[in-house]
Image (spheres, rainbow, N blue to C red):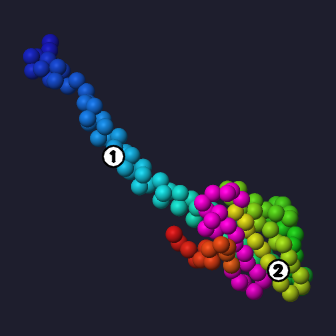
Amino acid sequence: MISPRMLYFRRRMSGVTLIELMIVVVIVAILAAVSYPNYREFTARAKRNEAKAALLQIATNQERFYLQNNTFTTDLTTLGFSTTPTFTTATGSYTVTVPSADASDFSATATYVPSDAEAKKCKEFSIDGRGVKASKPDTNCWTRTR
């Protein structure tokens, strides 16, 4: 049996008003507007780190190859990568190549593939046999944390 008090509460609880729903929508929109640029920057940094890691792995493997053969190589398969002359990072954002190598030096380059805002920041990373790191167009891409 339903008491009169329970019957009163059932009539009073009818749902949310349009104003309450709009307040929730505005709060969610503000949170999304704040978090989306941070998410984009985080994913861009992750892609950059992936390219830098591939270049550092190439440099390490080049040194190992040099100790055994007394020369550097442009062949990525001998350096432990699956393809040659180019290697694509796991996300597909950068293509890595070793355009030149001889008995005294090598150079390795990672080039950003998509044409979006990131291409204007860190389009290309490079490293050579002396350990010199460079990036274009922004020269701080190797050290940038943001």
- Residue 63 placement: quadrant: bottom right
Q: CA distance from mark 2 to mark 1?
A: 54 Å
122 horizontally vs 71: left or right: left
State yes or no: residue 120 in magenta: yes
Expressed as whole percent of the image width and height from the top left, the position of residue 37 reads 48, 57
Q: Are marks 2 and 1 in contact (CB under 8 Å)?
A: no
Q: Secondary structure at mark 1?
A: helix
Q: Which residue is mark 1?
A: 27
Q: Is residue 101 visible?
A: yes
Q: Residue at x 37, y 45 (%)?
A: 28
In the picture, the quarter occupied by the N terminus is top left
Q: Which residue is mark 2?
A: 106
State yes or no: residue 25 in magenta: no
Expressed as whole percent of the image width and height from the top left, the position of residue 84 reads 86, 63
The amino acid pointed to by label 2 is Phe
Looking at the rendered structure, the number of numbered marks drawn on it comes to 2
Residue interval drawn in magenta: 113-133
Observer-nearest of 120 and 57: 120
61 horizontally vs 69: left or right: left
Viewer-nearest of discs 2 and 1: 1
